Image: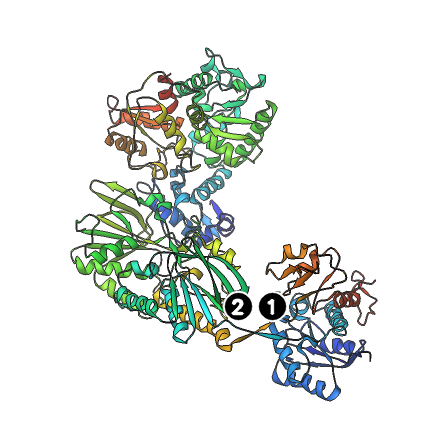
Amino acid sequence: MLQIESRQFSHEHGLFACIQCGKCTGGCPMALKTKLNPRMLIYRLLVSGNGFNLEGREELWDCTTCSTCYSRCPKQVNPMEAVIALRSAIVEKGRVHPNVKTALESTFRHGNPLTMPREDRAKWAEDLDVKRMADGADYLYFVGCSPSYDPRVQHVARAIVRLFQQGGVDFGILAEEESCCGSEVRRLGEAGLFEMIAEENQELFKGVGAGKLFTTSPHCFNTFKNDYPSNGLQVQHYTQVLAGLVEQRALEFRDKVEKTVTYHDPCYLGKHNNVFDEPRDVLRGIPGVKLVEMDRSREKSLCCEGGGGRMWLEGTNPGMRLAQWRVQEALDTGAEILATACPFCLLTLDEAVKHLNAQDRLRVMDIAEIAVQAL
Amino acid sequence: MTFTPKIGVYVCHCGINIAATVDVKAVTEFSAELPGVVVARDYTYMCSDPGQALIKKDILEQGLNRVVVASCSPRMHEPTFRAAVLDAGLNPYCFEMANIREQCSWVHPNEPATTLKAMQLVESSVAKAAHLTPLEVRQVPVTPAALVIGGGMAGLQSALDIAEAGFQVTLVERSDRLGGQAAQLHRTYPSLQPVSEMLGPLVEQVANHPHIQVMTEAQVVGVSGYVGNFRVQVRQGEAETTISAGAIIVATGFEVFDAHKRPELGYGFYPQVITTLDFERLAASGQIGPNGHQPSRVAFIQCVGSRDRVVGNSYCSRVCCMVTARQAHLVQQLLPQAQVNVFYMDVRAYGNGFEEFYDTVRESGVIYRRGNPSEILRRGDHVVVKAEDTLLGELVEVDADLVVLAVGMMPRLDASDTAGLLKLSRSSDGFFLEAHPKLRPVDTAVAGVYLAGCCQGPKDIAETITQARAAASAAMIPLMRGQVQVEAATSFIDEDLCAGCGQCAEVCAFTALSLHPVRGIMTVNPVLCQGCGACSVACPSGAINVHHFTFEQFMAQIGALVGELELPVALPNEELVPVSG
């Protein structure tokens, strides 16, 4: 039996404030196609006496942690965090999905969930003249796991390096020293491992004297900003720094990108952290770009289904992948490029385009990749 | 002849409120031995008629010249006992109170130390009582006029009532017309009477009333004075006038919640999404439909900007349930073929006839679905409302040609300016705070200033009128009495010590202190002074005392507390050591 003391759990997570209005479930992108129903989950926790059985609650693994539920809740209840905590209770009992186990072990051993060797972490930057943070720099560029290893996302890291070098930003990377930020580890319910990672990373950042940091991924950005204990480190997403360069004209675009572009707000940039404008400011700053909006933009952006550990899990997910819906929405705008600013979104949307056989109509690109074309 | 205090001490049981934790008999016996005390008694309820009679009898028979009652907070019963001693011929300022309930029996356990504390509090009050001096309570005449701020439903009704009673009223309205937000409403609920039928005559009566001066496009910019004699600066265009008033009614109204603050509902982006106020305008025009098209699917969404901590409005706006019911009813009547859905969290039909009206609305064919929509999306030429039907436990997508958001009520954005001018308190939700939620619902903490209408919290028209008429009645009490008592416990200057530095004037919130132009010392205007004591503390040379709270009286009180005190009772352990000088 996977029993938790639900009364204490409900108190700890403020679930007694819930008025069962259903706004969380009404906005939940997974509730449409899975058994996940945040409102009913809370209700069941509240009325279960003091023992709630997690056995068979497979839908807990459906949550993408997009935070729509929390952003809609009028009583500031956070169903997403409750789901993460319930996952933790399951993981604590050693009940981990094999895929997840591999990812977690790899993070523990190699500093990345992708089972890639640590010594290869900076290979993507070998031919680029990138400083090491240990040699001193204004900014620490925290590259992240997918941009370090995934051939598709490496393009994004390379583009960011070129843009920032061009813009005169003094930055350094940790190279082989860099380790996973732990965001997905935490969301997969491995709270203990996450704490360890967070401690080690903070030591590492302190050791290289990092005062300002920017990331490729909104997931790393969010976890440093909101999950790590506050430590005076200034954390930004690269689009925020880039928007500053564009605004101050430190970066000059000489070429044009004559394309119609629509922008997909990554959950961890938008809904989690209210960064809606900077990525759009960068796109608008690129000569030739015509920015069109999807109906679901900004606060209503549809999750790509890549977060919350969903890169490693199928969940109970019978329906069409959200990324495919999203690509369809992008196609409906007539855009030629679906821009985003998140490695996970990039990968899931890319795959969805292939799935829908829309490669000839729509290209998925990171904002950095578009911007670098205009240099 | 030297003054010899003859003090009576009266210790109250307050039922068991005091007696359960304090040994009242012991306190009484202890009090009887204190210097200057000629009689000490205890009684179940000192504030009761027999209790008061005890005090009066002793004053008359034993010639008491000072009285101490040990009971509750002075806020509770000081006026009662002052009146009692006055009745027996003693000056009310010869009375002193020891608070052995709120400051002792209620907050301490049933232990000997609690009784000891009660004794110390009584001893301290007795010491002060020996130094009390009679003070003259003065009356000043009241300006027989009222000023009403705000020309909405509440302000109009208050102004009219006061004017009908024969007093002069000045009505200050910020906009260029009277009527306020009610002017935008189509019909009332549940009676479905056109609002204009009620508002029109009211505006007319006020505008034409011989005792009412209406000032539109006018703004209150300064308030000074006190109950009975306020002086209010009103700016109208470039001109500024000063209006004298004995009482002020604040009826500044509310702000409608801005639905843009919940962007997921698409207000301002989708023409199909409107607010309840927008709907009122459509209803008045007779055209239900945003651009002339008759909708066949209409959705109403409750609690937009109400009961929502995220936007800062935790409270229920009270009117939206019935406004929505009325509007849904109208749609169903005008467009019988239309499919009308009301999304709700709870339906609050609390008023007279509300529940019956809610029955009528449902019976007309309106569907109530439990679940508050999370987002609205575009779908072709219409929109789709996404919600969980929480009774089904299913996520539903409801197509709609028209969506009406029931926007709530908020404090006015300039509420802090108004609060600053009138020194009003505000509750945690930002509305103006009444003096007591149950017993003084239209008074404020400032004497002579009253609240009416939605500036104090969301209300419907009936509730607004009720409160407006209540505020008018309350405001007329000082106006009809014609005189107000002025606090006698005011500050006074020791002219030998005062150097005229003016530091006291800087801290005075009531502009009661000024420099004498010839003598170079400060003078107190005893009518403006409220006896707060700030000046006394600020004075670097100790030249300012406050009557009834003089240095001498305070020192006697403190001396009694820190001086030698014999232990009349055994303490449970050694840790509790009485304070000694």
Residue A202, image quadrant: top right
> Is label 1 in contact with label 2 (beta carbons under 8 Å)?
yes
Residue B581, image quadrant: bottom right
Question: Which amino acid, by three-letter code, is at mark 1?
Answer: Val
Looking at the rendering, in which quadrant would you find the C terminus of chain A?
Answer: top left
Query: How far across and down, in percent of the image, does residue A32 sit?
Result: 30, 42
Query: How far across and down, in percent of the image, does residue A229 sit?
Result: 56, 36
The residue lying toward the viewer, choosing from A108 and A171, is A171
* Residue picked out by circle 2: B229
Residue B165 in the image: above or below residue B286 = below
User: Is A99 positioned to the left or the right of B4 in the image?
Assistant: left
Q: How many marks?
A: 2
* Residue picked out by circle 1: B527
Residue A370 visible here: yes
Residue B419 in the image: above or below residue A171 = below
Q: Which residue is situated farthest in the left direction here?
A: B337
Question: Which amino acid, by three-letter code, is at mark 2?
Answer: Asn
How far apart, in angstroms, are the residues tagged by discs 1 and 2?
A: 10 Å
Q: Chain of mark 1?
A: B
Specify whether disc 1 shares its chain with disc 2: yes
